[in-house]
Amino acid sequence: MSIRMVFCDSSSPVFWRRTAEIQVLTKRKLRFQELKEVEKLIHQMDELNDELLKKITNNKIQPPQRNFKVEKPQQVFVPLTFESSTEEVKAWLEAKSFSKETVEHLGILTGAQLFSLNREELKKVCGDEGNRVYSKITVEKNQLEKSRGESELQEIMKRRQERIDSAN
């Protein structure tokens, strides 16, 4: 058996056909290698997903133990009204966990005086805590106005009922 080598010049159609065949084969080989790499990546991702699924289901079955406890301080209800004394205002400020400086600065005021302060005045007196003080005071004031409105309405209804009863 003899090996015959055929040399073609670049102008021959055989040369170009062979060149095209080599290019196609090279591209197919590269594509095959790329597909193998993609399959390998998919296999790794599948293994990772399986492992994650096992961990998730194990955590649902047996949640991890947590050895910490958050203790909340007992909330003391200290009402604040327009009639509150300086001692009651100070107790309210302390119950709301304001800083020592804020309690000292505002604890000398009565309830009416505290309610009369605006946001800017509270910021000047309390610094960064002024906004929080203003918010808490606003909540208290709104609750007082709501309860006053309800009691006024009840009083009006009571008077009207008395008029109806006396007319009969």
Image: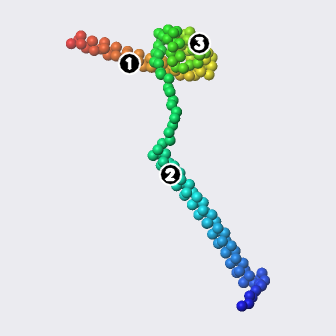
Q: Are marks 2 and 3 in contact (CB under 8 Å)?
A: no
Element carrying mark 2: helix
- The residue mark sitting in front, 2 or 3, is 2
**Of callouts 2 and 3, the N-terminal one:** 2
Residue 151, quarter of the rendered image? top left
Q: Label 3 belongs to which residue?
A: 104
Q: Label 1 belongs to which residue?
A: 150
- For mark 1, does the 10 Å Cα neighbourhood hold few (<14), some (14 to 19), or many (20 or more) residues? few
Q: Position of residue 99 (x, y in %)?
A: 58, 18
In the drawing, does residue 32 fall left or right of residue 77?
right
Looking at this view, is 18 or 141 the one in front? 18
Q: For residue 63, which numbered disc appears in the image?
A: none
At 47% from the left and 44% from the top, the residue drawn is 62
Give the Cα separation between the discs numbered 2 and 3: 58 Å
Q: Is residue 72 above or below residue 63?
A: above
Q: Residue furthest bottom?
A: 1
At 68% from the left and 73% from the top, the residue drawn is 26
Q: For residue 54, which numbered disc appears in the image?
A: 2
Q: Position of residue 149 (x, y in %)?
A: 40, 17
Q: Which quadrant, please, contains the C terminus? A: top left
**Three-letter code for the amino acid on which mark 1 is drawn:** Glu
